[in-house]
Image (cartoon, rainbow, N blue to C red):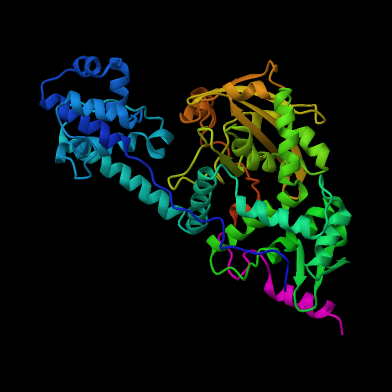
Amino acid sequence: MDTGVSISPSPLSLDHEEVDTLTIGRRIRQLRTARGMTLDDLAGAVGRAPSQMSMIENGRREAKLTLLQAIARALDCRLDQILDAEPLDARATLELSVERAMRGQTFQALGIAPFRVGRSVPDEALAAMLALQAEIERLREERSATPEEARRANVALRRLMRTQDNHFPELERVASEMLEATAHPGGPLTQRGASDIAAHLGFTLHYVPDLPSSTRSIADAKNGRLYLSTKVAKGDPRAAVLQALSSRILGHGEPTSYDEFLRQRVETNYLTGALLMPEAHVVTALREAKERRAISIEDLRDAYAVSYETAAHRFTNLATVHLGIPVHFLKVHESGTITKAYENDDVNFPTDRLGSIEGQMCCRRWTSRVVFEEDDLFNPYYQYTDTGNGTYWCTARVEQSSEGAHSVSVGVRFDDTRWFRGRDTPNRGVSRHSVETCCRRAPAELENAWRGQAWPNVRTPRTLLATLPTGAFPGVDTTELYEFLQAHAPS
């Protein structure tokens, strides 16, 4: 089917690498001590404070290339000796492995604070710590092996989104060309505009009362018919049409893996947002709001007649690339479980050992949880939260869904708060969620009184409890799907 839009290979594909600052720091320390230099000696030689050099040697700060070159000159060595990929000696390798372990989720979840590994600690003690950590991680992996593919796919996709600042020019181009092909005059897309896109793609719209419960819409490519539920009036009818058509615009085929299924879903949602809220028009409005220091997700929602979640998502697509504002996004179920997340502002989200955020418990001190306690459901909630990574400001709203209430929040670093409406809020919070006692573990007196005496019946979104579904379209009953198409196909 000719859509009038040219499609390039999927924009959601990119490699991701990280620099090992711990190894670089350890090599600097080894070279320094081998030359009989103190930390103060090296700091003075390169014109830095001893505390800064200590952070570099401990792997807590990444040194720029110019500083590494200065350190190499001070240590009378070549730069490649500091950046050498060869393994360290056995003792240094042990110490480095323990330091990495102490920064990982296993130690943090147990509330074990990182400590300096001195020379007096026996090799056997370090090896025992690593063996215990490996066994704990093995048990955790064994317990959660079934959905591991989905978690790994989520992690890989989020890394890509962070690398691209959640902005995909190829999808923006496809949206722009489709709007131009249907003579869209600019500004928010109307219901008529969505119908024009459907007609341009060769589809007629059919609203039916018996759409399979596991689907949002069904496209019959054979007969050019797009089926939607008569219940769509409860949501945004434009979004339902566009989400169904976006896969056709992008030329998606049946996914052959969960990774491909997830990528297609993200592309579909992105393109839907780009059609509902065209980039050029939204960026102009956001730049004007930034000039007035009055950026507001609510204003975006109202101007384009979309849901708060759609407006928040679209803001993350455009904020960093066009406004220079790093940002984070969270969607949290009323149970406290994170269902969606994105960040490129270094906010410290809770993760499992694979780096997956979905399914983790959100800190109860964060805006995303506190907002559920607010009585005012008609105005946004704002809060500053002090975290181990600095202070963040967030704006949040609660929305209802078939799975219960969810909060949707957008946040920025303290320095970027000056561009937003709501920056004068008096609401403050303090989160230390990397320490289990912050909020995931009850106070000791309560735990002692009730542990072993309480047995709750957990209510969690069913999508988080399900194992990875089978079939070409995870979660969809294909028999029900094909029976529906057979029954509604034109005779």
Residue at the image position 81 percent from the left and 44 percent from the top: 187
- Residue 19 pos. (x, y %): 35, 40
Q: Is residue 421 visible?
A: no
**Rendered view: 439 above or below 307:** above
Residue at the image position 16 percent from the left and 30 percent from the top: 30
Residue at the image position 54 percent from the left and 37 percent from the top: 344
Name the quadrant containing residue 98. Answer: top left
Residue at the image position 63 percent from the left and 23 percent from the top: 417
* 42 vs 145, nearest the viewer: 42
Residue 376 lies left or right of residue 149; in this view the side is: right
- Residue 295 pos. (x, y %): 72, 28
- Residue 406 pos. (x, y %): 70, 41
- Residue 449 pos. (x, y %): 53, 27
Q: Is residue 247 visible?
A: yes
- The C terminus - image quarter: bottom right
Q: How many marks?
A: 0
Residue 427 colored in magenta in the image = no
**Rendered view: 333 above or below 209:** above
Residue reaching furthest to the bottom = 491
* 33 vs 485, nearest the viewer: 33
Q: Which residues are magenta?
A: 467-491
Residue 291 lies left or right of residue 89; in this view the side is: right
Residue 479 colored in magenta in the image = yes
* 440 vs 266, nearest the viewer: 266
**Rendered view: 87 above or below 346:** below
Name the quadrant containing residue 353. Answer: top left
- The N terminus - image quarter: bottom right
Residue 64 lies left or right of residue 279; in this view the side is: left
